[in-house]
Image (cartoon, helix red, strand yellow):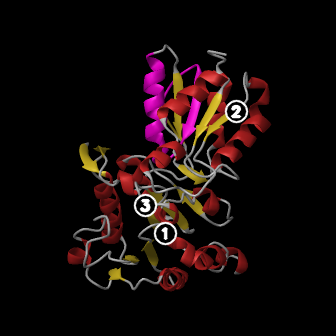
Amino acid sequence: MREIQFREALREAMAEEMRLDKNVFLMGEEVAQYNGAYKVSQGMLDEFGAARVIDTPIAELGFAGIGVGAAMNGLRPIIEFMTFNFSLVAIDQVINSAAKMKSMSGGHFNVPIVFRGPTASAGMLSSQHSQAFESWYANCPGLKVIVPSNPADAKGLLKSAIRDNDPVIFMESEQMYGDKGMVPEGEYLMPIGVADIKKSGKDVTIVSFGKMMKVALKAAEELQNEQIDAEVIDLRTVRPIDYATVIESVKKTNRLVIVEESWPLAAIATEVAFKVQREAFDYLDAPVLRVMGGDVPLPYAPTLIDAYLPNPARVIEAVKEVMYINK
């Protein structure tokens, strides 16, 4: 084990897979000469050359379409969006081509492609560059959607995504690229669709994924000081969702709080809450609560950003509400 940055873990995953399989290549804006907008692909052009680390014009629809066609013809593209906000320009290729091709071709065409890049807020970037699209893509059959929260998971899950024969949306955070964490040395993979219990507990279940895991874990740490023992689950994958791990936890704790950055309507949290009330209703001692982003376009002002985003204090308040404390 050694401590490396989130961006380094992603780079290792891509480079290892490119060494193992000559059909894997990386394409996107600034991935080659500039070493990546967030330096995720630093040094990869030098190792793999311009035929496999490919700079593109500012034309997401175009290079996403090239990637889909390449995948249908036996290659394994990694398409980097500088931000998933820009993926809206390419969403027709992602949804109507990549996600549907296997079904429309009667199984004759697989599309082994990874679309990856940062999602959600990243400081004072305002409304058009701060959107969380996890639930948008998770809504579409034919896609797998991964949102890792730490370097070790990011590496293992990205390697699995590159090897997967279906299209995968791999969503990171601009604010996490510099995060450090312990990552195993050598070859390892992590299974897609398996949640991870980051902290065991008995009083309440807190579920989250991606960057919001920091909020969930910080809240759990502060709750421990008040003798409230929270179990914290990292979904890691939001399509497919590992409902079984969540439900088994709720059967133990009898309470559930879900933390997610996105807008409230039709969120991942909504779907998890539905499934829990459907499969574990008799175990619930309180209504499921969600801690979500605001139902508005994300503002620019720091004070309004703070008001918009979930934070540990809001999670603690929700936990105390489902535990009927201070009521």
The answer to whether mark 2 and mark 1 are in CB contact below 8 A is: no
Identify the magenta region: 199-225
- Mark 3 and mark 2: Cα distance apart in space: 32 Å
Number of marks in picture: 3
The part of the image, by quadrant, that contains residue 166 is bottom right
Is 210 magenta? The answer is: yes
Q: Residues within 10 Å of mark 1 (few under 14, many from 20)?
A: many
Mark 3 belongs to which amino acid?
Answer: Leu
| Element type at mark 1 | strand
Question: Would residue 90 appear left or right of 32 to someone viewing this image?
Answer: right
What numbered label is drawn on residue 115?
Answer: 1
Q: Residues within 10 Å of mark 3 (few under 14, many from 20)?
A: some
Mark 1 belongs to which amino acid?
Answer: Phe
Q: Residue at x 44, y 76 (%)?
A: 77
Q: Nearer the viewer, residue 279 or 176?
A: 176
Q: Residue at x 43, y 61 (%)?
A: 125
- Mark 2 and mark 1: Cα distance apart in space: 32 Å
Query: Where does the image place residue 306, in percent across and percent down from the top left?
Result: 47, 44
Q: Identify residue for label 2.
A: 288
